[in-house]
Image (cartoon, rainbow, N blue to C red):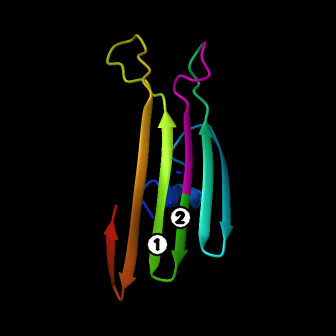
Amino acid sequence: MPTATPQAIPSALGDTLFNNDIQYIGKLNGFVFAAEYSFGESKGSTKNGASQAIALGYMDGPLAVGGAYTTQKPDVSIGSIGDYRDQTQVTFGGSYKLGDVRFSAG
């Protein structure tokens, strides 16, 4: 969401970062809110491989700022036996366009 960060704003505008997911995207007066749930698709478990994300962003003229919170339980195994681990990411970022130059941080 999944928001001016590379992961969050594109997701909030309709691009998905996860497979087989459900998204909600709301836009109002320059604000963008996104929520996303990706099903785990792991045999015998609905949580293994699943992802959840929320994002909030603001875009108006040359300014864009946003952030996202994502939790997931990916398979981090090297071998054939699944090893699912909880992961959490928090991202923030922003940009400002001045003429033909865009300044970004995140």
* Residue type at the position of mark 1: Ala
User: Who's the residue at 60% across and 64% down the image?
Assistant: 32
Question: In the image, is 19 to the left or to the right of 89?
Answer: right
**Quarter residue 81 falls in:** top left
In terms of image quadrants, where is residue 77? top left
Q: Position of residue 76 (x, y in %)?
A: 37, 24
For the point 54% across and 70% down, the residue is 58
> Quick check: is 52 in the magenta stretch?
yes
Residue bounds of the magenta highlight: 44-55
Secondary structure type for disc 2: strand
Looking at the image, tell me whether mark 2 or mark 1 is earlier in sequence order: 2
Quickly name the residue at label 1: 64
Q: Where does residue 73 sit, x and y in percent of width and height?
A: 48, 28
* Crowd band around label 1 with a 10 angstrom C-alpha radius: few (<14), some (14–19), many (20+): many
Query: Which amino acid does the dot numbered 2 rest on?
Result: Gly
Q: Residue under circle 2?
A: 57
The reply to whether callout 2 and callout 1 are in contact (CB within 8 Å) is yes
Question: For the residue labelled by badge 1, is the local secondary structure a helix, a strand or a loop?
Answer: strand
Q: Is residue 97 magenta?
A: no
User: Residues under labels 2 and 1: Cα distance?
Assistant: 7 Å
Picture coordinates of residue 15 (x, y %)? 55, 54
54 above or below 66? above
